[in-house]
Amino acid sequence: MKNLVVLTGAGISAESGIATFRDADGLWEGHDVMEVATPEGFRKNPALVLDFYNQRRAQLNTVEPNAAHHTLAALEKHFNVRIITQNVDDLHERAGSSNIIHLHGELRKMRSVLNDDILPCDGDIKLGELCSRGGQLRPHIVWFGEDVPAMEPAIDITSQADYLLIVGTSLQVYPAAGLKDFVAPHVPIYFVDPRPSLASHGRLTVIAENASTGVEKVARILINTI
């Protein structure tokens, strides 16, 4: 089967009711992202940051994957689908996709401030909750200013794509936005977003629709190429 690489961002999860990082007022759930999504913010007020992500984790229990997530999972019947997501939710997993790289971490995981050993996390992380070595536990989230350890495997996967599908991302956040530059020159690129930052040209096809309807359109196009 041919390789379909899918890069997803906040727009695909927004249809399930999950707020995006960059709302019109520049806040995320009422918070300045520098307060809740940076190492400096965590050092300054760890209780606030832990509570913020505890709320985001709890919100996951109130939402479900939408049609776009399910369509991507169904495409595994026809393609070798690899999803590279900027999202920290688990909606791709719950929809049934089996090959997923989370560039920015995962809400349902945690790690110590002392090391990168990753642990499951289904409940709250409390201030004073420590690892075996005495380090405070923190969300397994890649905050602004931190390295993105999954970038190298993501680049490798993208370079092997026969098709690239970009869904629900503004292509403004680096290094993730640069992944599209690693596909081979002949590879078709499909970009689904209701307010796309690019226009169709050459091998790039832009579908200015929400994720649910746009991904379904791309799926039909791709299946017809087999």
Image (tube, rainbow, N blue to C red):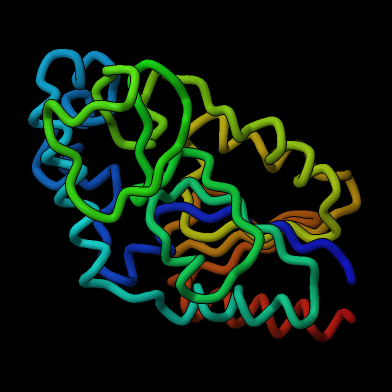
Q: Residue 214, located in which quarter of the rendered image?
A: bottom right
Q: Is residue 203 left or right of residue 6?
A: right
Of residues 76 and 131, the one drawn nearer to the viewer in this rendering: 131
Q: Is residue 29 left or right of residue 219?
A: left
Q: Residue at x 27, y 18 (%)?
A: 134
Q: Residue 42, located in which quarter of the rendered image?
A: top left
Q: Residue at x 23, y 47 (%)?
A: 23
- In the displayed structure, 81 sits above or below 224; it is above
Q: Residue 175, located in which quarter of the rendered image?
A: top right
Furthest-front residue in this view: 132
- In the displayed structure, 158 sits above or below 45; it is below
Of residues 161 and 133, the one drawn nearer to the viewer in this rendering: 133
Q: Residue at x 60, y 56 (%)?
A: 100
Q: Residue at x 38, y 45 (%)?
A: 109
Q: Is residue 129 left or right of residue 199?
A: left
Q: Position of residue 68 (x, y in %)?
A: 50, 75
Q: Position of residue 207 (x, y in %)?
A: 57, 68
Q: Position of residue 135 (x, y in %)?
A: 28, 19
Which image quarter is the C terminus in?
Answer: bottom right
Which image quarter is the N terminus in?
Answer: bottom right
Of residues 20 and 123, the one drawn nearer to the viewer in this rendering: 123
Q: How many marks?
A: 0
Q: Position of residue 211 (x, y in %)?
A: 47, 71
- In the displayed structure, 7 sits above or below 47; it is below
